[in-house]
Image (tube, rainbow, N blue to C red):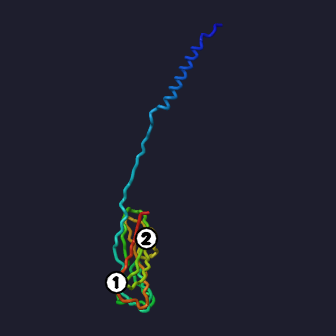
Amino acid sequence: MKPSSFSKKDFHKVALTSAIALGGFAASYSFAAPVSDTATTAATVVAPIAIAQAQDMEFGEFAAGDGGTVTLTTAGVLTPGGDVVVTGTTPTTTAAQFTVTGVADATFSIGITDDDLSSGANTMALATVHDLDASSQDSPATGTLTGGTQTIYVGGTLTVAADQAPGAYTGTVTATVEYN
């Protein structure tokens, strides 16, 4: 047999070539061009929710007598209690109404605040009740903008003191709404 003609020098040459080839192969992964992809972004701006006072609350005229209450339903029906007497045969009474508008079928929260009615230094406490149908008086915390609109009806009960001082009493009822 013939001794191998593969020398040490040849071995080092092959080893060096292999190392360079492997290094080049590895380098091709580490120096590869970056890859990317794109996602679409989107946003929808909707009409802001709005509220408008459509009708004021009016309890009409009554005499205090020895005191009691005057209750106004969300449908505008007045009922005296205790010794309070409604004067006249057809007192003008109306529940407050607010019209809410915005995105069709969106839900919204409802907040109602009220002030006591006052005439100078004299006051009568007002406790409100509200609904969305002018009949249930269930004071819902939320509503739905069916077709983009909803009416909030507000009634309440006045506490009338014995011998309540005569006068024109006024106050405010505020309805606050916000998209859920």
| Residue 117 place in picture, x, y as percent | 39, 81
- Residue 97, quarter of the rendered image: bottom left
Q: Is residue 142 above or below residue 123?
A: above
- Quadrant of the image for the N terminus? top right
Locate residue 122: give its quadrant.
bottom left
Q: In what element is the residue under mark 1? A: loop
Q: Rounded to the nearest whole Å, what is the CA distance between mark 2 and mark 1?
A: 26 Å
Q: Which residue is mark 1?
A: 92
Q: Residue at x 50, y 29 (%)?
A: 27
Q: Earlier in the sequence, mark 2 or mark 1?
A: 1
Quadrant of the image containing the C terminus: bottom left
Q: Which residue carries the number 2 mark?
A: 111
Q: Residue at x 52, y 29 (%)?
A: 26
Q: Does the rendering let one see residue 94?
A: no
Q: In the rendering, at what x and y percent does residue 61 appear? A: 36, 87
Q: In terms of depth relative to the viewer, which is nearer, 133 or 93?
A: 93
Callout 1: few (<14), some (14-19), or many (20+) C-alpha neighbours within 10 Å?
few
Image point (36%, 66%), residue name: 50
